[in-house]
Image: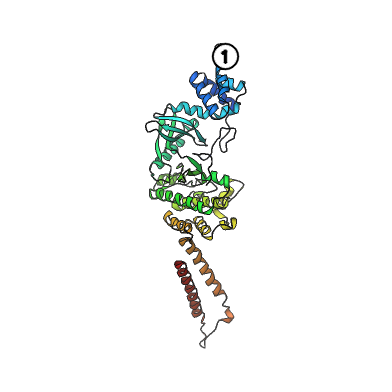
Amino acid sequence: MADAPKRQLEDTTPLKGQSGSGTPAPDVNETQSALEQAAKGGTNIDTLVGRLVVDNGLATQEEVQHALEHAKSVREEDNSASLVQILVEQEYVTKRQIARLRAIIEAERSGQKIPGFKILGKLGAGAMATVFKGVQLSLDRTVAIKVLPRKFSQNPQFIERFYAEGRSAAALNHPNIVQAFDVGKAGEFHYFVMEFVDGRTVYDDIVKQKRFPERDAVEVMIQVSEALQHAHEKGLIHRDVKPKNIMITNEGVVKLADMGLARAVSDKEAAEAEAGKAFGTPYYISPEQIRGERDIGPPADIYSLGATFYHMVTGSVPYEGKNPSAVMHKHLKADLIPPDHVNPKLSAGVSEVIEMMMAKRPSDRYKHCADLLVDLRAVLAGGAPTIAHKDVFDEADLSAVSAAEAEVAVDEIPVDQSGASSVRPMLIVALGVMLGISVMINLLQALL
C-alpha cells in the first residue's frame, strides 16, 4: 500500500498552507494577540516561534534571522515589540499562518509542564483534542500525547470521557491496538500519552487510491478483527470503528486507535445513562447504536467494521444522505447494495462476508470476531466463507423448496380412490431431492 501523510487523530489541521477539515478556523486577531503576549516573554519564545516558522516552511532561516535582529533593535525603543509582529510586518508570514501555530506554541510551552516529556511538534487536531509528537525522556521513547483543549478543561463530562479513554486503552495489550502509556494532569493540562504510530490511516489510503485491492483489504480486516476480539474478551466494545480510527504503520502493521467511545459491556450504569442516545459515526454506526439500545455487544463493532470493509473495497460508504439523520435512517431501513454490485471485481466470498457483517439484526451477523476470522481467513486462502456462504445457501435452499411447492398446482394434485390427497408424499420427495443436492454440493466444496 502506498505511503500517505502521518496521522494520529481523526481530523487534522495541516499547517503548510492547507485548511483543516472538522476543526473551526482560529480567530486570527485573537491568536496573534495571544502569541504577541507570549512573545513578550523574551528570547525563548522568539526562538520557539522562529523554529516553528522555519520547520513548517512558512519562512526561510535567513528571513527569520533578519526578523530576529530587527526585533532586537526595535525593542531598544519599544519593549512590546515581538518577533510575531515583525514577521507579519515584513510579510514573511501572514496572520492566518501565525494563527495556525498557536496550538503548537501552547503545547510546546505546556510540554515543559508535563513532567518527563518533551513536545516535538503537532500531529493533528480534532474537536475533542490536539495530538502532539513527543519524547518520553526517561526511556528516550517517541510517543503521541493527546491534550484536552483548554476550553474543555473545566467541563467534568469531557474530563471524565478523556480519562475513560485512557483507562479503556490501558486495559488492552495487543499488537494491533494503539498502546496506552500514561494519563494524567499537569497544571491546567489533561494529557494522555500513547504509542506513536509512524504511518497513516485507512481513510488516508481510501482518499489516495479510492479502493483497496481485495487481498490488502482482507489482510487489514483480519488484523482489526484480532484487535476487536481481544477488546471484546476484555469486556470492552469500541463503538467507533471506522477508517480514520484504523492506522497502518510503514511496516504494514494495523493498529486500532481511539477508545474515546469504548464502553464496558458490564457497565450497566453507563448503559442506562446513555439509553436512547446514538453514540458513533453516522456512516459506520450500527442500527442498535442508532436506536440507543442498552445492550450493545460485539455484533455492533462487527457491523461498523463491515461498513468500513465496504468503504475500503468499493470506494463508497454503504449509505449516503443529505445529513447524518438521513444516513442513519438508511442504516435502519434501507437495503444494502451488495458490494460486488458496486465493484464487480470483488469475489462473491468477500461480498457474502460483508453482507453478513452488516445484517440489520445483530442475531443475523457474526456473533463473535472468532467466527468472522474463520471466514476472512478462508477468503484470503481463496476459498468460500464457511459461515456466511452456508447462511446464503440455506436461504437459497428454502426458496427453491418454496418454488417447487408452488409448481404443484391444486388441480394437478393426484387423489387416491379414498379421496385423500397425496401431496404430502410428493413434498417429502421434493424435500429429499433438495437435501440430497445440498449434501452433494457441500461434499464437492469440502473436496475442492
- Give the residue pinned by disc 1: 74
Relative to 199, is 344 above or below? below
For residue 399, what is the image quadrant? bottom right
Q: Position of residue 66 (x, y in %)?
A: 57, 19
Which of the two residues, 82 or 432, is positioned nearer the viewer here?
Answer: 82
Amino acid, disc 1: Val
Which of the two residues, 81 or 149, is positioned nearer the viewer here?
Answer: 81
Residue 375 visible in rendering: yes
Residue 287 visible in rendering: no
Q: Position of residue 407 (x, y in %)?
A: 57, 76
Q: Position of residue 109 (x, y in %)?
A: 47, 26
Q: Is residue 160 left or right of residue 98?
A: left
Residue at image location 47% in from the left, 74% down from the top: 436
Q: Give the residue furthest to the top.
A: 77
Which of the two residues, 201 or 447, is positioned nearer the viewer here?
Answer: 447
Identify the secondary structure beneath mark 1: helix
